[in-house]
Image: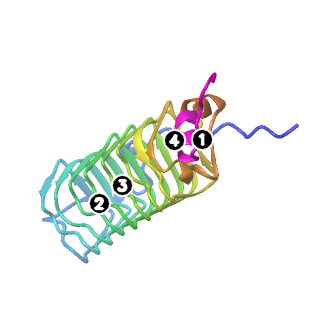
Amino acid sequence: MGRTPASPWCPPPPRALAGLPYAGHLRPLDGQLVSEERYDTVLIEGRDFEEADGGDASLIECALSSVAFNGGRFRRARFSDVWLHTVRWVGTDLAETNWLDAEVVASAFAGLEMYGSEMRRVTFYNCKLDAVNLRSATLRDVSFVDCVLRDADFGGAGLANVTFPGSTLEKVRFGNARMTGVDLRGAVALGIALGQDGLHGATISSTQLLDLAPQLAQALGITVQDGD
């Protein structure tokens, strides 16, 4: 008999601000975020940014809480060992950004360009990702925990060791995605709008397979017909 895959791994609960190892070193942001600047152990709290330009900036061991970004450009910015809580990004250019050891909690991403981004050891908790363009992105060791992903586009993306425990996927696109060790069994809803072929290499449950059967049959050109 074949070996039954292990249950999907679930990350530990999100940390509070005080629980961050660098919490005691944080200092408030002075002024605005600007491009090509390095921000180290900076706390950004209760701020609204309109059309901010943080392109090529680096945020290292930083914490963002109750922050809103409307529009703006952060292309090729680097987020390393950052903590984001109740952060709202709307219509922001985050293409080709680099995320390493990031924790994103109770935040909302809407209408973002994040194509070509790289994420490694990133966890999203109770977040909403609506119409986020992640085409050709690279995600490794990434978890979406109790999140809602609606109209997210992973077309041509590379996903390795990615999990979705407790998350809802609605009209998500995986066309030409490359998956290794991706576990979708923890998702409470698996709505795939396009790119069922991109699920090659993913693990799903038998119930999810039954739900996806009509779409998979259509993608494979199979006609399902009962009777004469």
Residue 90 position, x and y percent, is 21, 51
Q: Nearer the viewer, residue 22 or 211?
A: 211
Residue 33 falls within the magenta-colored stretch? no
Query: Amino acid type of disc 1?
Result: Ile
Q: CA distance from mark 3 to mark 2?
A: 33 Å
Disc 3 crowd, CA 10 A, few/some/many (<14, 14-19, 20+): few
Q: Which mark is residue 113?
A: 2
> Are dots 3 and 2 in contact, CB under 8 Å?
no
Query: Amino acid type of disc 2?
Result: Glu
Q: Is residue 130 above or below residue 161?
A: above
> Are dots 1 and 2 in contact, CB under 8 Å?
no
Which of the 4 quarters of the picture holds residue 160?
bottom right
Q: Which mark is residue 222?
A: 1
Residue labelled with disc 4: 164
Nearer the camera: disc 1 or disc 2: 1
Nearer the camera: disc 3 or disc 2: 2
Q: Nearer the viewer, residue 40 or 217?
A: 217
Query: Amino acid type of disc 4?
Result: Phe
Which of the 4 quarters of the picture holds residue 169?
top left
